[in-house]
Amino acid sequence: MNKSLLTLSALVTLPLWAQKQQPNVVLIVADDMGYGDVSAYGQTTISTPNIDRLANGGVCLTDGHATSATSTPSRYGLFTGMYPWKNKDAHILPGDAPLLIPTDKFTMPKMFQKAGYKTAAIGKWHLGMGYGKIDWNHQITPAANAVGFDYTNVIAATVDRVPTVYVRNGMVVGLDPNDPLEIDYDNPFPSEPTALTNPELVKHKWSHGHNNTVVNGIPRIGFMKGGKSAYWDDATMAQYLVDEVKNFINDNQDGPFFLYYGLHEPHVPRTPMTQFAGKTPLGPRGDVVVEADWCVGEVFKTLEEKNLLENTIIIYTSDNGPVLDDGYEDGARESAPLHDPKGGLRGGKYSLFDAGTRVPFFIYWKGHLQHVECDALVTQMDLVASFADMLGEEIPKGLDSQNTLSTFLGKKQKGRKDMVVEAAGRLAYRYGKYALIPPYNGPETNITGNELGVVDHYALYDLSKEPAQRHDISNEKPALVKKLRKKFLAIVGSHYNERTQQESLK
């Protein structure tokens, strides 16, 4: 065994509270970045050297998954260690939704707090705030802080939804009390312009569903009135959030700290900073992937300057798979022949096919991990149980999270035996390298162009032989379908009503 693995073995054997130093943890989660968007997995259209540095210097997971093919449930699973489909409210939330995670619920950041860490959430949130109709002009309670973060400065929902403001520790940043902020997701405010009533205000054209309040020339989802002094600048958002991350690291460099950094790239609307506009042949979507890579580089550089790299675990991943047209005409569809954000997989955001949840997933720890490429089946949800093992902390019984710490740290090539994935309320099953998609009624392709994974029978795919999922082998392996169907139904129980679904297909 080499020296690096001996060191790692000792670290894994001893809980960190018994060690001299506890490692910081930086968890970077991109928004809608596909398996094929990072060059570490082999694509050559976009250069992502900073993300690749993590992949090539640490554990590169090639079958790593989010729990869901959409943002809110994915992040719910990440922080709670629970399958999001077990919570009926864990779906894509509007910008004024109440806090999805109960304040008395165990979470990963609470676990880090208990272990003596300072914790922060910066960037994309999308897990709700408050208890109901939010008053944005006063302290919002409970804020993101209530689930285990000492410091928060977050985008309440998504960049394409109102409110277009940052919320720091439950307060809207830069709000003028004489210009109160109002939000409504059902009805427009009288006399307030929208993309439909005042199309001349629109500079960033919408393709579907994004035709309400216009901010910075960009039409959004939802209606907003007032609060203009607090509106963010889309074109400088990346710099603003990176600066927040740097400030937190600087203020807590004596550690230990746990930092969740939610990138907003490459989610729509795609508005790269000036220095990244036109940097790729793929239009704004390609440019913001490059911008996201720069953000990772800035974090890396800050840790390096503070001599923290050897005592910091960096995790890079994405909340779900990629999407091209997700509401704006920005040339993403037209760039498809030049670049495959799915990396040869099938599906994407909203889809039960593998590209819906198989995402970039890299773990870097300078001086402790060597480069390992791992094809074990793993999920972000398992970070909870794995970090609990590393910290010497206990987790509640009944969590869906499994301890795969040795796999995450490159010591083993063994992951989960199976898992259930979710996409917009629909469920599918992974068992080893097999993917089982149950029958579902509905259109095969949604408006964004992703194949949802809608079939009229239990479809079976062998991803070890055909990751593109074009060949359904259910007729060739009926006994295996029967076996996996039984396992799937035993896990999901009443969350998938087989009889109702089959009747709807008749």
Image (tube, rainbow, N blue to C red):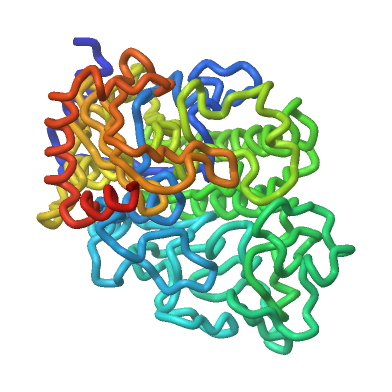
Give the tally of numbered discs. Answer: 0
Quadrant in which the N terminus is drawn: top left
Q: Quick check: 304 left or right of 420?
A: right
Q: Quick check: 41 left or right of 158?
A: left
Q: Position of residue 402 (x, y in %)?
A: 18, 41
Question: Which quadrant would residue 332 be assigned to in this image?
Answer: top right
What residue is at 52 percent from the left and 73 percent from the top?
96
Outermost residue toward the right in this view: 200
Q: Position of residue 97 (x, y in %)?
A: 47, 72
The answer to which of 343 and 363 lies nearer the viewer is 343
Q: Is residue 214 above or below residue 55?
A: below
The answer to which of 20 and 118 lies nearer the viewer is 118
Q: Quick check: 265 left or right of 203?
A: left
What residue is at 19 percent from the left and 29 percent from the top?
481
Outermost residue toward the front in this view: 506
The answer to which of 179 and 33 lies nearer the viewer is 33
What residue is at 72 percent from the left and 55 percent from the top?
234
Q: Position of residue 59 (x, y in %)?
A: 36, 24
Q: Is residue 346 above or below residue 111?
A: above
Outermost residue toward the top in this view: 1
The answer to which of 228 and 196 lies nearer the viewer is 196
What residue is at 37 percent from the left and 37 percent from the top?
455
Q: Position of residue 304 (x, y in %)?
A: 51, 33
Q: Quick check: 68 left or right of 349?
A: left
Visible residue check, residue 312: no
Visible residue check, residue 235: yes
